[in-house]
Amino acid sequence: MNILSIIDSRKWDIVSYQALHIAVQLQRSGHNVMLMCPPDCTLRDKAAKHNIPVKFMTFAAKMGFTDYSLYDVVHFYDPASVTPLMLKKIASSSKVFISQIRMGGPKTLSRVKAFEPYVSRFLASCASAQEDLCAAGIEPAGIFIVPPAIHIARWESAMLIKPAMFLKRPYKVGTISMDTTLREQELFLKTAKEVLKVLPETHFMIVGLKDERLRTMARDLQISHKVDILWERTDIPEIMAMLHIFVKATYNPGLSMSLIEAQASGVACVIPRVRGLSDSVIHDRNGLLVEPGNSASFAAAIVSLIENPPVCHTISKMAYDQVSFNMSVPVVTNLLCRLYEDSKAVAGGK
């Protein structure tokens, strides 16, 4: 098949990650894949390293003035990149797929609903995203859940050393956050203080946004000697290899690439019960779910894992299996290919 994948984002985030790694796997499977993205985005440079051809997202392209008939499938990885003129032009000759990876607000979902006559399949990243699309009035039969993909081989080395890591003391608990409001990081630090009251030997780590106020917060809580603040890093697999427990202290619904990476690394995860984030986690099986925004609830879950190493290890192994079996790039790409082929078969049968 000839496939055009469109992502209109300048950031390197969970959406861009999906577009790139699925394109690489599709190309390895013998398909012809083209990425369309802004000329000044990170995705362009990463695509070049993998020999994935790139077209630039221009105003003319958004208005439909590009020959989209060259492609059997045009896949939008973010509804924000869709314009009505562009969509009408594409749908006249190609099958259209739209992925809803992030959680959408009412305005976004209303806009996506208007695209329904031209779209072959809507792809929801999780059950909550599927519910949102259905609530917007989109026909459920046209919505499929396609989970986010991860290049799991990059994280397997961390997983392999976890049995030995769970024998080491003290336990290390970490989080990754780029929250510019610092609410997530503040909640994590308050959680750390609660844990240290019970288990004073525990160590903590914050990776992500560079902001000196984090050090001030840790000092004000009198726990700075127990918290490593590392800012943004490029060696996240090595970071995950050092952790026993990963905490995602978010307040907001949506998916988290760092959570998926932690699970793929065999790190036991403690996360809040928020839509999207907790969709694939079964409490006490492949993670622990806690009350959002409640440091005492987070702390109690962390303490329970540290005090029960076999349970902690079992949860981490089940989290890894969940990601490996359902979210590896080859698995997700195979699912997408079946949906692409099915859409062509339906059209051919009409």
Image: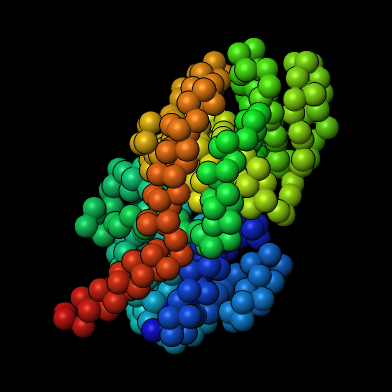
Towards the viewer: 295 or 349: 295
In which quadrant is the C terminus drawn? bottom left
> Taking the image as drawn, is residue 256 in sight?
no
Q: Residue at x 58, y 61 (%)?
A: 154
In which quadrant is the N terminus drawn? bottom left
Look at the picture and state if 129 lies above or below 143: above
Q: Residue at x 81, y 28 (%)?
A: 215
Residue 345 in the image: x percent, y percent? 22, 79
Towards the viewer: 13 or 200: 200
Residue 106 in the image: x percent, y percent? 42, 41
Give the image quarter of residue 13: bottom right
Q: Residue at x 30, y 72 (%)?
A: 338
Q: Residue furthest top?
A: 197
User: Which colouring convention does the figure follow?
Assistant: rainbow
Towards the viewer: 271 or 127: 271
Horizontal side, residue 345 vs residue 166: left or right: left
Towards the viewer: 345 or 199: 199
Q: Residue at x 34, y 66 (%)?
A: 335
Residue 216 in the image: x percent, y percent? 82, 23
Residue 315 in the image: x percent, y percent? 43, 38
> Taking the image as drawn, is residue 167 in sight?
yes
Horizontal side, residue 329 vs residue 12: left or right: left
